[in-house]
Image: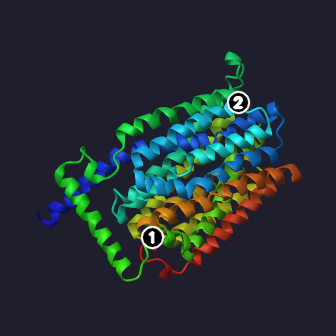
Amino acid sequence: MTVTDIDVVGARAIARVKRRLVPFLALLYFIAYLDRVNVGFAALQMNAALGFSSSVYGLGAGIFFIGYFLFEVPSNLVLARVGARVWIARIAIIWGFVSVAEMFVVGPRSFYLVRFLLGAAEAGFFPGVVLYFTYWFPAEQRAKALAQFSTASMAAGIVGAPLSGVLLSMRGMAGLDGWQWLFLVEGLPAIVLGVVALFYLTDDPPAAGWLPDDEKAWLAATLERERTQVARASASGTDTRARAGLLDLTVWRLALMLFLIVTSGYGFSFFLPQIVKVLSGGSDLKVGLLTALPFSAAAIGMVTVAAHSDRTGERKYHVAVCAVVAAIGLATASRASSPVVALGALSFAAVGLYSFTPPFWSLPTAFLRGDGAAAGIALINATGNLGGFIGPYLMGWIRDLSGDFKFGLLTLATAATLSAILVASLRTKNLKSEI
């Protein structure tokens, strides 16, 4: 083959892999993210029905991430051993059943328990997909593929917000409250898709009967070259064992950066419906429609930022600027006197909060290898996502103290600012490439 022929075959292979894997995994992530944050819409009715204060709600919403943290690293290590097909299917089926079980919550204790179990059930899905993409996409293609996958979280807001509003309006049907219908209807698809995953996903390129031989050969050769580079790095002193990923100082610094932005992100997303309710004074359906606006802006921003990061090959400052944008938006929303300006600022914040993710995840995959990648990626995601516990809890606690969301939003803006400073101060020499 000529160089041109090889380029054409490679382009076809990457396009085929994207068509096969990214839409299905994005659909799973859509459901996962929806089941994770739909409690924010349920709270519009559930808090009053069950007598929850903002602090009780914030603690319950965030305790999801304690279970997530405890089971994240073990889950990703098991995925690396048994294969993505079986393990991703297992994750989806169990989280679907637990999500449906949220409709049976009767008080704070059962609320805390089922949220913890949901986090434990979903643990490993997102970092598992990040690891899975290293089996299918060459390094220079991963950020774009991950961005396309990650836009599912935006779709969960764009589609899920009005859907949740509609489900809340089903209050009283078949003897169920609207928030119970929400958990039931939005939890069932995970179970169905988990079963489908057993038959649809493929563990790695050699097992892919759906790839033509020339494309399979190109993909295998390209990924093998990257593995050879890993082997050379290992021979020159780079440790690819799980222990190396867990003890690497740069891994922990990245985990802290993610922790801070996630504190802002989930404090924002879990309370966004309630903030919009206060701003608009509208019905649950209207709140659902308005809440879709920040997620729509974020979806556009995420794809744009990731494409620019891939095109330029720069990661660090793309991540830092996203954190700054989030901080500015959150701070402006906290001071805005007009509901329109506040909603615009929240949309601006959403762009920064969610565009942070794709270029950020290109940082650890640039220097972690082998079992070190499985462990390090899971550690960053698990530790970073503890911010998902802190953010909602702080928002609920501060609201109970102050009576509004202004000081809570300022706190989230501070966390995003600190994340930006840490990212900007990251030394290039700590990573081998892609910064």
Q: Position of residue 126 (x, y in %)?
A: 51, 52
Q: Amino acid at mark 1?
A: Arg
- Note whether 167 is above or below 300 in the view shown: above
Residue closest to the far left: 1
Q: Residue at x 71, y 42 (%)?
A: 113
Q: Nearer the viewer, residue 362 or 82?
A: 82
Q: Quadrant of the N terminus?
A: bottom left
Q: Amino acid at mark 2?
A: Phe
Q: Nearer the viewer, mark 2 or mark 1?
A: 1
Q: Nearer the viewer, residue 295 or 394?
A: 394
Mark with earlier residue (2, 1)? 2
Q: Position of residue 335 (x, y in %)?
A: 78, 57
29 left or right, relative to 405: left
27 left or right, relative to 405: left
Q: Position of residue 405 (x, y in %)?
A: 79, 51
**Mark 1 element type:** loop
226 left or right, relative to 360: left
Kindly identify which residue carries mark 1. 241
Work out whether residue 168 can be spotted: yes
Q: Residue at x 47, y 32 (%)?
A: 192
Q: Residue at x 50, y 80 (%)?
A: 430
Q: Nearer the viewer, residue 357 or 320?
A: 357
Which of the 4 quarters of the picture holds residue 250? bottom right
Kindly identify which residue carries mark 2. 104
**Mark 2 element type:** helix
- Note whether 202 is above or below 387 in the view shown: above
